[in-house]
Image (tube, rainbow, N blue to C red):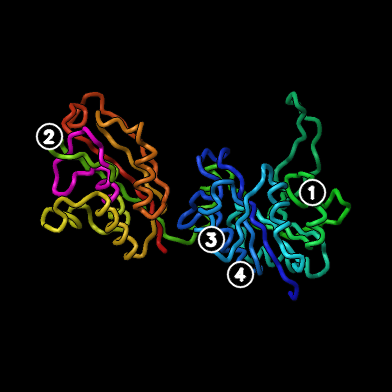
């Protein structure tokens, strides 16, 4: 292909439908975010990449994707965001791919297929998959109006390809649509289709993320591990460290290290998943260098050991068991702190009591249970 090519990645959407409190493009999928997956697929194919970012997240995305990629602030709608990016593209560009960060696993080969059809003379090219389900047209009051012939229906994906002049004209008047090909259709321009791919699914819900995980790990070894730790409360002069955080005005835990049961349970789960022994064999009382060690230090070393064994962490789930401290008010803080130490992986944290039973129920101490999912790199 002789002409200059560019790609726009629409990443300005929120994570509301996903249930996330961050933009969808920043959701983690294994070892990288969705926007990083999308960039990795397009970078070998095009000369230049533009990303439309949510306001306030531009610098975070720049940090993730590097200085060679142009990040612009997106608009209120997808069409408005794409129009903003189009204005930043040099008019010397011949072809432009428009891609959704939510379709993070679309392959480089799919992008090449779209560009190849453009190079053959088409002005607009979109990847599609045949519709295999029966589709109904439903009225506003919930009744079926008609049943289209599914043989003529297709599910549309991205990246979609355009000659630059066509895309520029489509966005000239500020029209809006759910995809850019619809704007081109409205201009009377023919839209060519090429075969899409199952892995180019749109990640909108947590279930979609699980399906995407399958595409990435279908040929990889997945391992899980469970870790449990418990400590009794110590003397009044002991500080309480839990989830790598200091809890003021709380009595700390007895232990060889700082007694952070949350960090210890996660370490144990990671070691179990990677078959690297347990907390005692790695950081036990026979290891004086770990006397008084912080939970952050132990987690950092556990991550290093797991990585050296050839594994990466997918996600961590943690449950803290005890009457105190109350976790709810600092749950987000605990999640952020643990995720940071673990390299940015997703972490979930819950808390419960034992209805007055056992060491935790009588207020003698705190326990934690963690599960870890790791995969062979």
Q: Nearer the viewer, residue 376 or 86?
A: 86
Q: Say whether residue 173 is left or right of residue 208.
A: right
Q: Is residue 263 magenta?
A: yes
Q: Position of residue 20 (x, y in %)?
A: 51, 40
Image: 4 above or below 325: below
Mark 4 residue crowding within 10 angstroms, few (<14) / some (14–19) / many (20+): few
In the rendered structure, which disc, 4 or 3, sits on the residue that comes first in sequence?
4
Residue at image point 58% right, 42% down: 14
Point out the stretch of residues depicted in magenta.
246-268
In the rendered structure, which disc, 2 or 4, sits on the residue that comes first in sequence?
4
Quadrant of the rendering where the N terminus is positioned: bottom right
Mark 3 residue crowding within 10 angstroms, few (<14) / some (14–19) / many (20+): some
Q: Position of residue 24 (x, y in %)?
A: 55, 46
Residue 182 image label: 1
Which residue corresponds to mark 2? Answer: 236
Quadrant of the rendering where the C terminus is positioned: bottom left
Q: Position of residue 4 (x, y in %)?
A: 72, 71
Q: Is residue 300 magenta?
A: no
Q: Say whether residue 119 is left or right of residue 201.
A: right
Residue at image point 48% right, 57% down: 32
Q: What distance separates the C-alpha of mark 4 from that of mark 1?
A: 27 Å
Q: Position of residue 333 (x, y in %)?
A: 37, 40
Which residue corresponds to mark 4? Answer: 44
In the rendered structure, which disc, 1 or 2, sits on the residue that comes first in sequence?
1
On the question of residue 54 being in view, the answer is yes
């Amino acid at each position: 292909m002789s002409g200059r090519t560019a790609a726009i990645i629409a990443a300005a959407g929120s994570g509301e439908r996903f249930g996330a409190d961050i933009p969808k493009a920043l959701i983690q999928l294994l070892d990288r975010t969705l926007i990083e997956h999308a960039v990795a697929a397009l970078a070998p194919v095009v000369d230049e990449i533009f990303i439309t970012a949510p306001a306030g997240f531009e610098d975070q995305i720049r940090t993730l994707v590097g200085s060679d990629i142009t990040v612009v602030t997106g608009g209120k709608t997808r069409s408005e965001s794409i129009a903003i990016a189009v204005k930043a593209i040099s008019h010397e560009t011949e072809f432009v791919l428009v891609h959704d960060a939510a379709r993070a696993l679309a392959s480089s080969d799919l992008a090449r297929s779209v560009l190849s059809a453009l190079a053959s003379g088409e002005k607009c090219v979109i990847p599609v998959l045949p519709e295999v389900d029966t589709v109904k047209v439903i009225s506003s009051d919930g009744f079926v109006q008609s049943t289209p012939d599914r043989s003529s229906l297709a599910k549309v994906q991205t990246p979609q390809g355009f000659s630059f002049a066509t895309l520029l004209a489509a966005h000239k008047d500020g029209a809006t649509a759910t995809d850019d090909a619809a704007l081109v259709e409205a201009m009377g321009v023919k839209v060519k289709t090429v075969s899409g791919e199952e892995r180019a699914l749109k990640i909108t819900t947590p279930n979609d993320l699980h399906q995407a995980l399958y595409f990435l790990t279908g040929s990889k070894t997945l391992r899980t591990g469970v870790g449990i730790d418990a400590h009794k409360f110590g003397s009044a002069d002991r500080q309480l460290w839990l989830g790598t955080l200091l809890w003021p005005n709380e009595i700390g835990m007895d232990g060889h290290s700082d007694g952070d049961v949350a960090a210890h349970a996660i370490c144990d789960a990671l070691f179990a998943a990677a078959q690297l022994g347990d907390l005692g064999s790695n950081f036990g009382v026979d290891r004086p260098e770990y006397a008084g060690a912080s939970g952050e230090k132990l987690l950092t070393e556990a991550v290093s050991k797991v990585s050296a064994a050839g594994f990466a962490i997918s996600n961590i789930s943690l449950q803290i068991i005890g009457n105190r401290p109350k976790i709810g008010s600092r749950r987000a803080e605990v999640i952020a702190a643990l995720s940071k130490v673990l390299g940015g992986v997703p972490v979930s944290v819950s808390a419960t009591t034992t209805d007055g039973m056992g060491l935790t129920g009588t207020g003698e101490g705190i326990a934690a249970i963690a599960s870890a999912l790791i995969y062979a790199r």
